Amino acid sequence: MTEYKSMLEYHRSEENNDRCAPFMADSERLYEIGKSYAENFMELYEKRSDDVIYWENSRGGAGLHRGYYCPSPVLDLVTGGLNRGKLLKRKTTNKSDFEYGFDANEKLTLTRQNYENIESIGAELIFNKDGVETGISAEINSFSEKGYGIKEASESHYENGRICSWCICFFNFGQGIWEYRKEDYEYSCEGLKTFDLYSLHYSKAEPMLRHSKYVFEHDEEGYLSRYKVFEEEPEIYEKFKIPISEGLKKELTKECWYEIGQKRKV
């Protein structure tokens, strides 16, 4: 009970509100962008489908936004249970998990996600302009009033062909914002140096923000080889005298390297 009261005190504090404010504002910005497509999403979706020059299909990656073509270069490497899936060399009789549509400029402009045992599909429209990629996702079904509902809005920023940041806002079934995530990337001459992951549980009264920083090393061939992660929460617990178990404290403050099993250059 003491721990709960201490956490509640922190989440209602001015310091927490100030810490969460930039992420709250950005989530609201993305939410408004997503809402602006609420009326004409299907019209744009059908036009995009007609403009697709060729399709790619993939299996796996169902738990990762956009599957194989997820903007995050490393989220699947540092999160248990996630994988990007793999592209299929040819279309099979079995339903693929994702379908990717490319335009005449070989730009990915449309994705479809096929859900298992559910009579609906996920669809994402992708727009590129001046190094910024915007994605608007919806669930298309036969049981809602419009036949679809906007569920996510995302934005990626690129410089010199490298992704610098990616943020995504999850909608609460059309009733507002549920969650927001942001990833920032920093590079060295070897490649990806650090990756900051911010996860915001959206709430006007008691927002909750988690921040994890991942530090990477590369092998002699330039592949990502291992990483360690630093959590911001222990400093907050100490400052607000929030009691936590020794096991959790040890887990949050341990400094150890995690090996990366997949060969990937970033």
Image (spheres, rainbow, N blue to C red):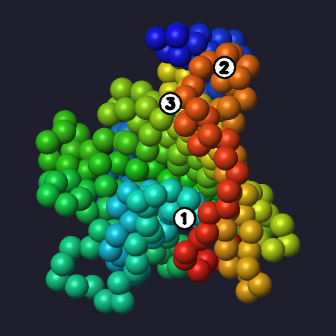
Residue lying furthest right: 189
Q: Which residue is mark 3?
A: 201
For the residues labelled 3 and 2, the Cα–Cα distance comes to 12 Å
For the residues labelled 2 and 1, the Cα–Cα distance comes to 30 Å
Q: Are marks 3 and 2 in contact (CB under 8 Å)?
A: no
Q: Residue at the spot x=50%, y=27% of the render?
A: 202
Q: Which residue is mark 1?
A: 77
Q: Residue at the spot x=34%, y=70% of the render?
A: 60
Q: Is residue 25 above or below residue 93?
A: above
**Image mark for residue 16:** 2
- In percent of width and height, residue 7 lies at 56, 17
Q: Residue at the spot x=73%, y=58% of the render?
A: 215
**Image mark for residue 249:** none
- In percent of width and height, residue 101 lies at 40, 72
Q: Residue at the spot x=65%, y=32% of the render?
A: 233
Please tell me which of labels 2 and 1 falls first in the chain. Answer: 2
